[in-house]
Each structure stands twice: as C-alpha cells, then as structure tokens.
Amino acid sequence: MPPLERRHKPNYPEYFELAMTKNRINHRALASILTVALLSAGCASVNLQSHIAQTPEQALDLAGQEDNRETAQRYLLRIASRFQDQGDDMAARTLLQSPQLTQLTPPMENQKRLLAMAGAVALQDSEWARSLTVDLDVESFINYSPELVGRAADLQAQTFALAGDRLSSAMTLVLLSQTDGTANPQELHDRIWQLLKAVPEPELEVANTESIGYEVQGWLELAAAFREPGTGIDEKGRTIRRWQNNWPVHPAAQVLPSELQLIATLAESRPEKIALAIPLNGPLASAGKAIRDGFIAAYYLDKSVDRSKTDIRIVDTSGGAFSELYRELSGQDIDLIVGPLEKDSLAGLRSLNTLPVPALGLNYLPAGSQVPDGLYQFGLSAEDEARQIADRLAAEDIRDVLILIPQGEWGDRVESALLQRMAENNTTALDIERFFREDNLRAVTADLLGITISRDRAIQVERTIGMDVEFEPRRRQDAEAIVMVADPTIGRQFKPLFAYYFGGDLPVYSPSIVYEGSPDPSRDRDLNAVIFTDIPWVLSEANELRTQSANYLSGTRGQVGRLFAMGADAWKLSKRLPLLRQIETASVNGETGVLTMTPEGSIHREQTWAQFRNGVPELLPELEKPMSESNAPEASTDTENTAP
C-alpha cells in the first residue's frame, strides 16, 4: 500500500525568517519548532504496513491519521499483538479497548477477540472478561482456523471462568474434546471436572434438566451425583463406578478425571495396619490421650471401615528417642505411622531422605526445613489462624489495624505469619504492642490507642505555656480495627479497656485462643462483639461425633476437646493422604476445619468464624477471600494453638 500523502508541508525558510526578523524566538525555541515540524511531516508519511509504534498513544495517533479505516485497524491489531508478545499487556489493552477498533470485519473481529481474551487472562481482568463474554457463546471458538482452534478454545474457557461463568467454561472444553482430536484427554477432563465442581448448585441443577447431547448430559449427571450430601470417600467411589456403568462409552468413563481415578481406588489402597505413636506419659500425656481418644472414636463411627482388615496399634512415644522407635516400627508389617506429637521427635526424621513407611506427623517442622519423602505434617497451627485473620481483614476492606500479641517465641511466629499475609493483602499494621501477662494492661492499651502520646503532648503544651490547660485525651483516628491475640482471661480485660480509651467503636479480631471452647456467658460478656476464628468442632451446632463421644468420654470440650478433634481428623486424613497429595484442589471437611495439603505434605486448615453476642459465640457467614494467588499457606510450626 502506498505511503500516506502529506497533508501539509511546512516552509522551513519562512520559519527561520520569521524568527530572525522579529527576534522573538531564541535558539532553543527555534530548535523545538523545527523538531515539531519534522515530526509532523514524518507522521503524515509513515507506512503503517512496516511502521512499529513504541507506545499505544503513538499507535492510536498514527492510525487516526490514516484515511483507510481497515488499514488503520489492521495496524492497531498488529501493534497490540506485538505488545502482548513483549509482555506489555497493559499497552495492548489500551489499543484493544480503543473506539478505533469497533465495526470490524468478521476476520478482524475474531483476531481482536483472541487478543482481548489473551489480554484479559494475562491481566486477570475480570471486568474486561465479563464484557467479552457478552458476545461470546460456547461455540465461538469453532470460527477460528484449525491451527488456532485449540488456543481459541483454551482462552475462551479461561475467559468464561475469569468472568465467573464456570459452566460455560466447562462446556467450551467439552465441545473442544469433540472437535479437536489432538487435545490431551486427561488434561482436558481434569479441567472440565474442576470447573464443574465450582458451578453453583442451583445453576448445575438447571443445566442438568435442560442439557442436550450425550457428552454434556454425562458430565452434568456425574457432577450432580457427586454432590449428594453426606457421602464419604467410599460412597463416592461407588458413585463413580455406578456412573461408569451407566455411561460406558462416555469419554470421561474411558479416561476419568485424575481426582476421580484416585477416589475410585482409595478404598482399595487405604492403609490397613496403622501405628498411632503418641505420648501417653510425661508432660504431653493429656494431649496424647486426647488425640488417641479422638482417633479411636472417629474410627468406630466410620461406617466405611472393614474392621476385619483394619488393625490399629497404639504406641507410647514417651519412653525414648522416636527415631529408634520409627526404625523398629518401619521394620514391621505397618502401612502408616500416625505421629509423633513432639516437635523434637518430628525433627529427628529430617535425617532420612525417604521414609520407608509413610508418617503423618502431628506437628510441623520449622519453616524452611527439608521434608523427607513420605512425611506428612498436621497440627493445630496458630499461624494458620493468623493468616485467616489477615484474609478476613482484607475481605472486609480493612487496611489499617492495631495489633496486640503476647511476648515470647509463640507470639513471634504469630506476628510473623500475620504481618506476612497482611503485606500480601496490602494491609498495614499501624502499631504492634507485645505484652506479658503481668504487664499493666491499662498502659499497654493506652499506648496502642495513642492515648499516651496524646497525654504527653498536653503535658508538653502546659510546660511550654506555663499554665494548666483543660485536656481530654484523644485516641489515634487512623485505625480501622484491632487484632487482639490474647487468652480469655487477658482478652476480658483488654476489651473493656478499648472502650475506656475511646476505641470501643473499633472492631476486634482474634484467633481461637480467645475462647475457652465452652459457653460461659457470664464471663464472656466482656468479650462481646469480638470476632474470632475457631474449629468447627467447637463452633458447629450439630456434630454426630461430638454428641456420641460426649456420651461415653470426658475431655471432648475446651482446649483438650480441640486435641480430641485433631485426633479425629488424623483418622480421616489417614485414608486420604494420597488424594490430598496428588490432587491440588482436593480437600477434606474435618473437625478442625477444611483440610488441604501443600506440595510439601503440610496440612493446613480453614476454620469457621463467630462473634461474641451476649457472651455466647454466634456463627458468622463466610466472606470472599482475596483473589491473590500469593495467599498460599506457608509451613507452620506448632501443634497446639495456645500461647505457652
């Protein structure tokens, strides 16, 4: 295509003559005018077929000077693609959202859509994704050439998911599996399954009744059947096998999603000979016995257990070095060791590169430790709760907080986990007060709320002017909330002090340490309005295991009760370790929270939330979590969620 015709050609001698004659322009101004003139002349003659703009503004300006609309649009699409190739998706978005890229021909519209979907996904721009899906349907990707169909379908599925329409995302991939024979069926089925799992129940029910097509109906029926309430791993395995029998030629019946493959075989691969290695004597005896009772109670309440095959052996670890005990147990006919509880004993396993018998440790190695292959870690981590508090603050759009944490190594770890997650969520700690139990809590509170500084300022004014002044202390006004890490005895003193020092309007967030675990309205009224996180075992209203256990066992409530719940979850985990290890999105609804596993084998918990009202905890609804992927849990280092 010929170069753009010049629309105006400056007369350079006239510029110089005018400047020199009237003596109004100095040399620097003259150079600026000459530069502008040259640029103006050059822009008008740029060949858009070969020109490469360096900024989106330059590209839009050049395209705006082109008389041929299609030529300008092709140029903008080419430059947008180049920006994306260079990783500058923001610049590409500026071009792709420009009014100049409207009323495109069908081929260019397809090109723009492909670039826009890639940009929205790269930037995780959900608003842009939602605007793109307005004109997008499940079959849109079929309009692309054969070599682009796979990429178009992948981007279309990601765009639907980013826009919150996971059903359309899944259906896009189902259609892709029918039209593209080169797609990897295992990867495709895994993606479809994860998307269908996230589709809201009402939406899935409507889709299941209105679906058309063998493959679509099969997928939707599988997703619906898997959501039957109250089904354990074994029943889910039978559900999968029944579905395969009903849909024998369905692609997913031939290549099950990886998670379903694992679930279908769990009943056959679960450990049958288990050694529960815990301290039954010494300073940790009460903790060990509570874990033992919870483990055994959950075992007897588990209707899926074949008791003729399952053998549980309880071993006391308080008699000597656990490393020696482990070597002895690993030489016997044992499939899984649950334990140890002691951190030092767990650390003793770090010298092994691979554990000959898998072990579910009931504590955590220090952060950054080398974890032997075959070692899993599970406990009641205070760091998990600190991160959940930080996430709750972000979900409620609270950005500036004051923090109270007890002194000591336990408090150091809580503070570190809390501050790290707060930083990831763009939340600021305005002040952190560390305290001992014997400290003057009035002074600690006054320092936290800025009352001490306010008083000192008034005293300084009096000294300066040499006379008494009327003064009313004023708390700092930039704080939006208080994070209070304190046990019930200390918390009941702090909370009224917040009001006394003019901070009664600030919401207060705490970990489970603030609640003893059993309702005590007369004493806990001083904790009214405190929002805290705790395990479902403590907060849930209906719990069959807790009800049954309370009829026959003591120690199912309070702090010991939390360890009882931990023992119950250790039994649940013993059957599901391969599932959690191999399927990143897998989770277990446990007594201590929703349990997930990191790639290193550490179990982390998502607890429930409650608020003290009239001295009694009342459950709070869940809030959305921050979108950042950086919120993945870090390794924790404690079993009991109580300050020493």
Image (spheres, rainbow, N blue to C red):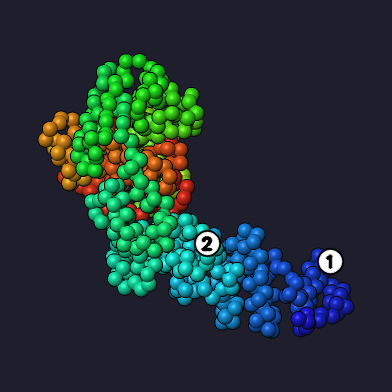
Q: Is residue 538 left or right of residue 100?
A: left
**Towards the viewer: 292 or 386:** 292
The residue under the point 64% across, 61% down is 85
Please provide percent x and percent y for residue 375: 42, 32
**Residue at image mark 1:** 27
Q: What is the three-letter code of the residue carrying label 1?
A: His
**Towards the viewer: 269 or 2:** 269
**Towards the viewer: 7 or 595:** 595
Please provide percent x and percent y for residue 226: 30, 56
**Residue at image mark 2:** 183
Q: What is the three-letter code of the residue carrying label 2?
A: Ala
Q: Secondary structure at mark 1?
A: helix
Q: Are marks 1 and 2 in contact (CB under 8 Å)?
A: no
Identity of the residue furthest to the left in this view: 551
Q: Is residue 412 left or right of residue 204?
A: right
Q: Secondary structure at mark 2?
A: loop
